[in-house]
Image (cartoon, rainbow, N blue to C red):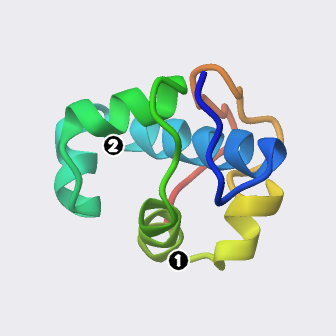
Amino acid sequence: MRKSADFTAEEERNSRTALKFLYQQCGAWEPLGKALGYGDVALSKMASGAKPMTTTLVFRIARFAKVGVDDVLTGRFPPEGTCPNCGYCPKAVLQ
């Protein structure tokens, strides 16, 4: 896994979890990519850690989820109980 110079390891991990959560809510990378303005392959690579998260993507995740950027970076979004590996959260409802 490559390290991003823009984020700490924890912020990178929290951002990836948020991205995976949105993937679960959207059902596939393609519709999420369209919503975020990114290609589905690029999102998949960022979610897996093969590519570092970008500042632009973190802002777009926050905007799409209607939460603050700080919520994404600190792990307050997605909801507690979300799996960091796949993004599944049994009690989550995206509004």
Please name the residue shown 68% across and 45% down the image: 12
Q: Nearer the viewer, residue 78 or 51?
A: 51
* Left or right of residue 31: residue 24: right
Q: Residue at x 81, y 35 (%)?
A: 81
Residue 23 x %, y %:
41, 38
Q: Secondary structure at mark 1?
A: loop
Q: Residues within 10 Å of mark 1 (few under 14, many from 20)?
A: few
Residue 93 is left or right of residue 75, and the answer is: left
Instruction: Please report the residue visible at 33 percent of the width from the left and 43 percent of the height from the top.
Output: 26
Q: Position of residue 94 (x, y in %)?
A: 51, 58
- Splitting the image into 4 quarters, where does residue 77 fall? bottom right
Dividing the picture into quadrants, the one containing residue 17 is top right
Mark 2 element type: helix
Comparing 17 with 27, the one in front is 17
Give the vertical position of 31 relative to 29 (above or below): below
Q: What is the three-letter code of the residue carrying label 2?
A: Cys
Q: Judge by depth and name the residue closer to the eye, 56 or 66.
A: 56
Q: Residues within 10 Å of mark 2 (few under 14, many from 20)?
A: some
| Horizontal side of residue 19 vs 7, given as left or right | left
Q: Earlier in the sequence, mark 1 or mark 2?
A: 2
Front residue of 3 and 81: 3
| Residue where numbered disc 1 is placed | 66
Report which residue position mark 2 lands on: 26
What percent of the width, then of the height, locates residue 16? 59, 40
Q: How many marks?
A: 2
Query: Label 1, label 2: how many angstroms apart (C-alpha)?
Result: 15 Å
Q: Quadrant of the N terminus?
A: top right
Query: Residue 27 has which mark?
Result: none
Label 1 sits on what residue type? Answer: Lys
